[in-house]
Image (cartoon, grey):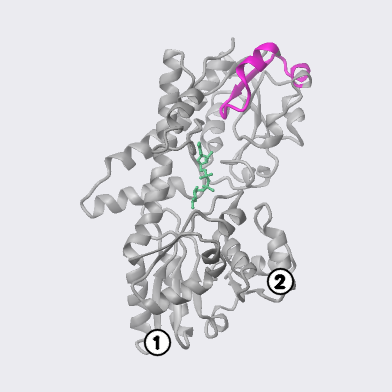
Amino acid sequence: MIGSGYVGLVSGACFSEFGHHVVCVDKDAGKIDALKAGRIPIFEPGLEDVVAANVRAGRLTFSTDLKNSIPDADAVFIAVGTPSRRGDGHADLAYVFQAAEEIAAALSGYTVVVTKSTVPVGTGQAVEQTIRRLRPDAEFDVASNPEFLREGSAIEDFRRPDRVVCGTDSERARNVMRQLYRPLFLNETPILFTTRESSELIKYAANAFLATKITFINEMADICEKVGANVQDIARGIGLDGRIGSKFLHAGPGYGGSCFPKDTLALMRTAEEVGAPSKIVTAVTVANDARKMRMAEKIEDAFGGVRGKRIAVLGLTFKPNTDDMRDSPSLVILPWLKGHGADIRAYDPEGMKEAAKHLDITMCDDAYQALDGADGVVILTEWNEFRALDLDRAKKLLKRPLMVDLRNIYKAQEMEEEGFAYYSVGRPPVL
Ligand code: UDX
């Protein structure tokens, strides 16, 4: 497994749990040392246990030595980062090709080289050409096997995926992939074999579709606010239609994270480049960017201006159960509020260390410390511990009982009974 970041580490650990021998490789010696010492560099529920159990069983090891990790391998996964290239939004493939070159130099015997990183259509072919150019003698195939892991439930997603997608025309490579995913095969998980191009595009299409679903319900929420409707009823009312489905219809402050923002942008660029521009994907990215900013204005309206106000903020990460801050709405909303004169007191169960690198705000030890003396509270991320706040205690700590709940985790009626002024997303406010 080349690259021991989020995807590489989860995939490597889970493949070792399937009974395979896995070496997770990374250039970052600090990361590999930490992993060898049993420390997991990211917060992901369940990952530490899977890693520990498989290290103990002798199936999972860590190394900085790519060269010596390749020759014995039946499959080599490229799971390095593909960030948005600065300036144009294209996926930056520098790490992928660097890995391909190093793999080429070390190949020995038949090997399937698998791109797990999210890569634009055509990358598999380019990786194959790179390896072929450097090693005309090597026996290998290049397959695409995108991941669909959600942060916070990645282990579960790996063990019980809705499907596995594998793109290759080679029957020999398919057999290796079948063996790798054998436990899932036995569980009757659909394993979809396609061409490499289709597999590469499936990943982008899936993420763009989900991002579209979220953006659609967010726009419905805006309409609801204008006409006095309730977006949760709309989501239920449309979600029960089997063709639509109820998942990914939670209105909120806009999607963030390591995948949706970068993948929608990359798909948009690819579509333009091949002369088939996607108006939908373009609109989704524009709408989502604008939304984050609008959420700051929504907070300002609820507070009746934020200058000189102290605002308690609960949640900083882009979603719960992760410490990932990448493209989190908080990175847009909080600097805006601060720039407009607010004093921000924030608490997040896992994200504060990472958040402190990007946000100049006061971090608190817990939710109640953030609330103490604040003019109101804003919920930005739906961590479970924020779903059951002691509202009496909160009222005593706040200067006035005001909540802006951008994740709709409280019931309007309950807040009314508690005497809160309560603003949420796509639902009538309690004033
Ligand atoms: C996503 C995909 O789900 C996963 O399959 C892919 O491989 C990587 O990207 P992830 O980014 O971990 O996973 O989180 P996800 O749970 O999909 O949420 C992404 C963003 O959408 C978050 O900001 C979340 O708050 C937001 N979201 C999600 C909503 O606003 N409403 C929803 O109904 C669902």
The residue drawn where x is 37% and y is 38% is 284
> In which quadrant will I find the C terminus?
top right
Residue at disc 1, secondary structure: loop
**Left of 336 or right of it: where is 276?**
left
The residue drawn where x is 53% and y is 72% is 180
Q: Are marks 1 and 2 in contact (CB under 8 Å)?
A: no
The residue closer to the viewer here, 300 or 280, is 280
Percent position of residue 231, x then y = 48, 24
Quadrant of the rendered structure where residue 184 is? Answer: bottom right
From this view, report whether residue 6 is shown above or below residue 425: below
Quadrant of the rendered structure where residue 383 is? Answer: top right
Magenta-highlighted residues: 394-417
**Left of 54 or right of it: where is 66?**
left
Quadrant of the rendered structure where residue 414 is? Answer: top right
Q: Amino acid at mark 2?
A: Val
The residue drawn where x is 40% and y is 49% is 206
Residue at disc 2, secondary structure: helix
Q: Which residue is mark 1?
A: 138
Q: Which residue is mark 2?
A: 55
Res. 404 in view: yes
Task: Tell how many labels.
Answer: 2
Q: Amino acid at mark 1?
A: Ala
